[in-house]
Image: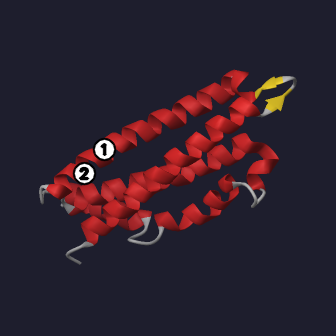
Amino acid sequence: MTNLAQERMAIAVAGIAAAEHLLEITTTYVKEREAFGRPLSRLQHIRFEIAEMATECAVTRAFLDRCIEEHANGALDAVDASMAKWWATELQKKVADRCLQLHGGYGYMTEFPVARAYTDGRIQTIYGGTTEIMKEIIGRSLLG
């Protein structure tokens, strides 16, 4: 029980790293993949999706950086660790889903890293405490 915050932070860091990596893979893919005679990256919807994911990853990274600093100083509490674990792993799942969609049919083929990340990343929201458990910890702290 004494290392739960650290374990949850490790899971959160793995989650944001995976999300950022998927975003990088997908950004490269949409620049190279053509549809209707031009790269996917020229389509406004694709740019919006990439922009949203990049922003969500950047905000999550900033929160995790703060939590890591608190942990290094011995000040990270169970609530912030739970928030970090919940948010980063759910973001990983969300980014994987959106990246798979942007890859189209290729995104569903297990030869592509996006398909593997989509299935492999699902466990992140379960081990170390499910998302629902993280919300319970946070809610109890706020509502006493």
Q: Residue at x 71, y 44 (%)?
A: 101
Q: Residue at x 49, y 49 (%)?
A: 91
Residue 110 location (% of width, % of height): 75, 61
**Image quadrant in which the C terminus is located:** bottom left
Q: Residue at x 26, y 66 (%)?
A: 5
How many numbered marks have been drawn onto this rendered protein structure? 2
**Image quadrant in which the N terminus is located:** bottom left
Alpha-carbon span between mark 2 and mark 1? 6 Å
Q: Which mark is residue 105?
A: none
Foreground pick, 45 / 14: 14
Residue 90 location (% of width, % of height): 48, 54
Q: Residue at x 68, y 26 (%)?
A: 45
Q: Which mark is residue 63?
A: 1
Above or below — where is 16 with respect to 52?
below
Circle 2 — which element? Answer: helix
Looking at the rendering, which quadrant does residue 12 occupy? bottom left
Q: Residues within 10 Å of mark 2 (few under 14, many from 20)?
A: many
Circle 1 — which element? Answer: helix
Query: Which residue is the extreme one toward the right?
Result: 36
Can residue 26 be seen here?
Answer: yes
Q: Amino acid at mark 2?
A: Cys
Q: Which mark is residue 67?
A: 2
